[in-house]
């Protein structure tokens, strides 16, 4: 493989396996190998309990495999400490979950600038300016100083996307991002994520039950019983 091809890869999983030991051992993910390229919009689909969230957690460095290797942006992650993994997540990954996980006592702007303040790359003024820019981009202009309970569920999810974009991540990982939304808000969140891949060349990896998500995706990964069956 040439260097140029390799640099297009943002994630490379080789034989990833995640087993839970115990009286009755459970294999959540079973020998999954895949590569994700820069700018791809990939959905992860499959029946309930097939391991979609487990795979996303492994790919998002929120869990460690029992076997196999994972490279993020060319870096092997196996030997990294918990702190180093947290730093890598903060700098290179953005997460959107089914529940927004916004901090209720913080304004929307503070929720969005929090990851920037943690990373410390931008000064306070630049972080505020970027926070406003992201909220505006996501159709939340005029709401920056509201708190999460003062806006709708669809708007909260858009704030969660703005927060995921805060540190200009390489990859956005989304776990059922439209699972709690009505159909209109779902469509808006879906098209926002799709626009992001087109406009900013972000890579999006989304677990979803929503077939219309897959229609607009570059690729759909199918899981059954923790195994990759296509994609
Ligand atoms: N901590 C755990 N202990 C025991 N079993 C677990 C644990 N976490 C997940 N599982 C099991 O592993 C399997 C995969 O779970 P996972 O949540 O990854 O599936 P999923 O495809 O995302 O499901 P859903 O679509 O219902 O959210 C399921 O059978 C689940 O019950």
Image (cartoon, rainbow, N blue to C red):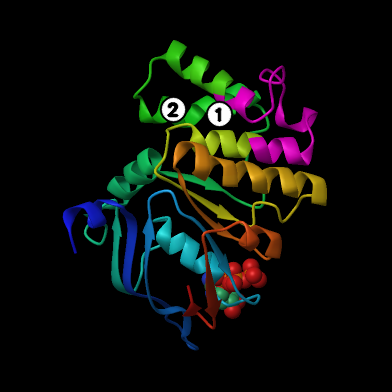
Please tell me in which quarter of the rendered image ligand 1 is found.
bottom right
Q: How far apart are marks 1 and 2 (CA)?
A: 8 Å
Indicate whether 144 appears above or below 72: above
User: Which residue is drawn at the image coordinates 64% and 34% (left, top)?
Assistant: 159
Residue 4 part of the magenta-drawn span: no
Q: Can residue 210 be seen in this view?
A: no
Secondary element at image label 2: helix
| 105 relative position to 134: left or right | right
The verdict on label 2 being within 8 Å of ligand 1 is no
Image x and y of residue 86, in percent: 36, 46
User: Do the residues under discs 1 and 2 have CB atoms within 8 angstroms?
Assistant: yes
Instruction: Kindly indicate the quadrant of the structure image that contains residue 91.
Output: top left
Image x and y of residue 135, in percent: 61, 25
User: Which residue is drawn at the image coordinates 47% and 67% (left, top)?
Assistant: 55
Q: What stretch is highlighted in magenta?
A: 134-158
Query: 10 Å neighbourhood of mark 2: few (<14), some, or many (≥20)?
Result: many
* Residue that badge 1 annotates: 112
* Residue that badge 2 annotates: 116
Image x and y of residue 88, in percent: 33, 45
Q: Can residue 94 be seen in this view?
A: yes
Secondary element at image label 1: helix
Indicate whether 60 appears above or below 111: below
| 12 relative position to 181: left or right | left
Image x and y of residue 128, in percent: 51, 16
Q: Residue furthest top?
A: 125
> How many numbered dots are placed on residues in this image?
2
């Amino acid at each position: 493989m040439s260097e140029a091809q390799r640099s297009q890869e943002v994630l490379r999983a080789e034989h990833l396996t995640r087993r839970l030991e115990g009286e009755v051992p459970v294999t959540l993910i079973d020998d999954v190998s895949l590569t994700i390229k820069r700018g791809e919009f990939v959905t992860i689909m499959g029946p309930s309990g097939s391991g979609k969230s487990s795979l996303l957690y492994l790919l998002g460095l929120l869990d460690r495999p029992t076997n196999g290797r994972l490279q993020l942006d060319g870096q092997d992650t196996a030997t990294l400490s918990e702190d180093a993994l947290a730093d890598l997540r903060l700098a290179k990954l953005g997460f959107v979950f089914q529940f927004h996980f916004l901090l209720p006592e913080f304004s929307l702007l503070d929720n969005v600038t929090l990851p920037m303040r943690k990373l410390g790359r931008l000064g306070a003024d630049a972080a505020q300016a970027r926070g406003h820019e992201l909220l505006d981009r996501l159709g939340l202009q005029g709401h920056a100083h509201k708190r999460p309970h003062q806006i709708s569920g669809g708007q909260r999810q858009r704030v969660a996307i703005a927060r995921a974009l805060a540190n200009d991540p390489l990859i956005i990982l989304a776990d059922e991002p439209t699972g709690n939304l009505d159909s209109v808000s779902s469509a808006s969140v879906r098209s926002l994520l799709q626009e992001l891949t087109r406009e900013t060349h972000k890579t999006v990896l989304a677990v979803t039950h929503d077939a219309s998500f897959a229609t607009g995706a570059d690729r759909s990964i199918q899981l059954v019983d923790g195994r990759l069956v296509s994609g």
